[in-house]
Image (cartoon, coloured by chain):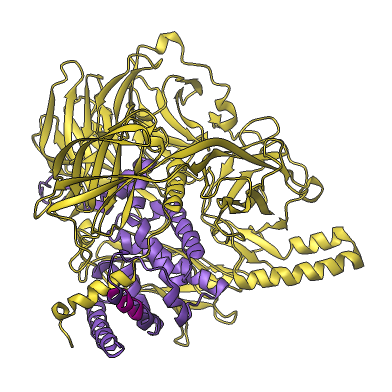
Amino acid sequence: MTSPDSSQSIEEKLYAANRMRPRPEFLAVLRSRLVEQPQRPLSFGDRLGLIFRRSVWVTVLLVIILLAAAFIAIGPQRVLAAFQQLFGYIPGVGIINESAPIRLLAEPVTVTRAEITVTVTSVTLTDDRTHIDYRIFGVPGSAYPAGENVTGCMTQPYLRLPDGTQLAQENDFPPVPASVNEAIFVLPCIANTLPGKTPENWQLPLRFVPAPPNFTVVPVIESLPSPTPTVLANTPTSEINPLTITKVLDIGDKFVLMGEFSYNTGGNASLPPGSWWAIKQVSITGADGRKVPQSYSNDFEQPTATRPDSETWLYQLQKNFVPPVTITYAGELISPVGAKEQAEFEFDAGPHPQDGGQWTGNQDFKLGGYNIRLVSIESSSGGYSFHFKADPGASSNAISVDILGYTPNCGGGGGGDQFPVEFDARVCYANMPGGPEFPHGKLKAVINFQALARQNKSFQVQWSPDTAQTGAFATSTPQAGVCLDSASLAQLKPVPAGLTGGKALLYEQLPGNNQWGLVLYNLDGSGKQVVVPNGNWGALSPDGSRVAYSASDNGIHIINLDSRMEKVLPGAGGFNLHWSPDGKQIAYIGSGNGVIDSVFVVDSDGANLRQVSSLSYESVIGWSPDGSKLYFVIPFTGGAAWKVYSFDLAGGKGQELFTIENGTPKFLDPNLSPDGKWIAYRGRDNSSLYLVHTDGSDMHLLLDNMGASGVAWSQSGWLGVSLDSSSGTAVILLKPDGCEAYLLPGLHGDLEGLSIP
Amino acid sequence: MPALSTPAIPSAELPDQDARLVFEAQKNPSAFQALYDRWAVPVYQYFYYRTGDVASAEDLTSQLFLSAYQSLPRYQQRGHFAAWLFAIARNLVRKDYRQNQHQLPLEMAQQVASSLDPSADCAQADEIERLKRLVQALPMEEQELIRLRYAAELSFADMATVLHKRQDAVKKSLYRLQARLQVLLEQTHD
């Protein structure tokens, strides 16, 4: 066998043979879509949609043909009833063929070895799949690789039937024959753990029983848009509407709407060639102008686009709106104008550019009529970042940098959506042994400038449910205990003058550049102070005098808000910072030295750094009012469930309290009220906010599907919450007991801290 | 109860780049742009050489990143972000293949736009085209090795994760394949 070194030239040729640069316009459009998409399941392009498995689609088509014949023979009502009985929806599983028997796991099965527990919590068996939910708890962080250069075990689990047949997992498992009512769930290893660090070859015996008569299967009614969606007046009739609705499902308490948006302007002869749509905002409103509440689940996959250059979308709308529903895509038509311009420059990166290397630019260029100054260049292990300062409006055009003689892996730049005068253009390269060479030495680079014209555009479609088919529905009444929902946000009054003496610490984008940082405001939005221009995970001390934060190097800093003196806590590095009630200690999540995201505590002067737990991916909840206990959560591996623990700091002992089963699989963001009464946390839909006592009792929904993101308590018992929506971030204040609530109209960032006397 | 370990003082070291970007993206959605910037072209290249056409590659790239954006919470920072991303990619292209029966005929390999510098000499361009045709004639499993390494630009560790194989086995397979292609390339040289 030829040794790797002698095949170096063939490697370079293989790299060259696999180079294919995508269209810059395509990259830019997709980038802008991701920028504008709130990270919650409420906006356009939500990729968790519906696709029938192919066998079910074929079945659906045959059924539709048969139904059409049956309509004629026996009348629509009886046919509809029959159709509704065929397909059902099981939350957590998806669309199933209800005419086939459904079986379930007889009882959950748990195996514990070496303090690690594997549990199969549920199994649903239908005629086309076996859906298994399982979770793992107790895997120490030391069992996982420290970084990506080491592989842990990736062998997939399988089902072993009594006759020895093995069913391998691909999304779900294949169906189990109806005559087989038991199987062994085999987990060869815990995903990505290192050999020898955890027990292997787990075997859990499963037993299946018929689903009981009261097992919930939601009937599904599928329809093409009915009536035909209307293209509304503000869409020019000379243009083809790129926005369409392709299918609607009624799955009980929700409608699932699916459609497409075509970014290809080629079909529109009236539009300049090379143009593309950049969608900035998607809104879904009812006839009363209110936003339609949406929900989120993992049960559906995104459908496939039927047109070229199209993106599919899917929304799950709660049956809580006044029809018709109007879907609005608002954005820009972006068109290249004139020829591309270029300017060259040189810089010496040195023979071995290091991560974080910096060079001064101080070169001026005139491109597209704009003065553009190259301020500085920075290298990282991925590539180079070129920092520019230009005339206002320059960054609204397409600006990129290429280094001559090197083929990049990525590139792009500009000011994003807000076209600041200072912006970066990045270009990156694979920097692996045998990969394309990382640019070094004396380099020639080219600034590419393409002028762009932008024209605001919006498109709309309307849809109404066929109430004769689905039944009339009305605005639902809020659950008991819920303080606010998306409908009530618009009615909130601004914070009264008596409360405006407080302060709010927000994480938000800073003006003039693309940086994000920590900013302190009065509650009425006045008194803005940028506390940390490039810090994150801010935490206000209980007396409001200091801010602890995680710096860009992962170090923990404390800044005094009066003196602006700042200190670094030596040896402490992490995030998710929580001050003790007396302001003398900070609990945080740290990593390193074989630890992945475990709980640490350090004194606020940097002394007495100690580790509290050693599992992984944990989050701090908060301190007991007397500072003697620390609360934190540890997630299960697989399944969005979290175990809540208290830890006695003096005794060094921990206690498992209860399990949160309805939390978000994203950042749970649990926060304990200073009086120790309530834990606030983000719900499964990644949008709602729940409260629960520290003993697990009285868990209830507080904010219903409102885009809850940042959460902070004040010492006086006010709960502050940032709410994300497609139109921006709002911050509210409320007292959970009694639901007294106010809007903080001058605040729009992610809430990190709250101080109210 | 998680044990109280010996008080090892962790250094304030930076997590690896992708892991940090994922953390930032979970906290601040706009940070996902950095992940996108890093992986958009390798993802596109992988899809392009799997499907053979620009439209499919763009469609699949869009699907992947929008799916990854929404699925990011299920990636729980256990290393191998790239492997996770390309596991999704392989699933997507498998579904796309079943629906659209993508095949890149051998003769189309000649029409695939070359990304070589236009100033490269003709002999080099011809050799690259011959290499492309040779790769297209390989069994699918070997084509996938080539695509993951040279189009997607994955590390051996990530390739092993994606392919569910041991890292040393992936390396051996690829090096043998390189040697074979070298010989074939020389044999087909006019």
Residue depicted at x 77% and y 42%: A472
**Which secondary structure type mostly characterizes the magenta part of the structure?**
helix
Q: Tell me the shade of chain A.
A: yellow
Q: Quadrant of the N terminus of chain A?
A: bottom left
Vertical comparison of A601 with B90: above or below = above
User: Is residue A707 something that shows in the picture?
Assistant: yes
Does the magenta portion include B71? no
- What is the magenta range? B124-131
Left or right: A305 in relation to A420 = right
Vertical comparison of A685 with A199: above or below = above
* Front in this rendered view, residue A542 or A17: A17
User: Is residue A650 something that shows in the picture?
Assistant: no
Left or right: A499 in relation to A362 = right
Q: Quadrant of residue A126?
A: bottom right
Q: Percent from the top left, x then y, of residue B57? A: 46, 63
Q: Percent from the top left, x then y, of residue A226? A: 76, 50
Vertical comparison of A189 with A177: above or below = above
* Front in this rendered view, residue A408 or A448: A448
Vertical comparison of A559 with B32: above or below = above
Q: Percent from the top left, x then y, of residue A335? A: 50, 43
Residue depicted at x 42% and y 26%: A748
* Front in this rendered view, residue A469 or A552: A552
Residue depicted at x 8% and y 55%: A351
Q: Quadrant of residue B117?
A: bottom left
Left or right: A236 in relation to A370 = right
Left or right: A82 in relation to B169 = right
Q: Which chain is purple?
A: B
Q: Quadrant of the C terminus of chain A?
A: top left
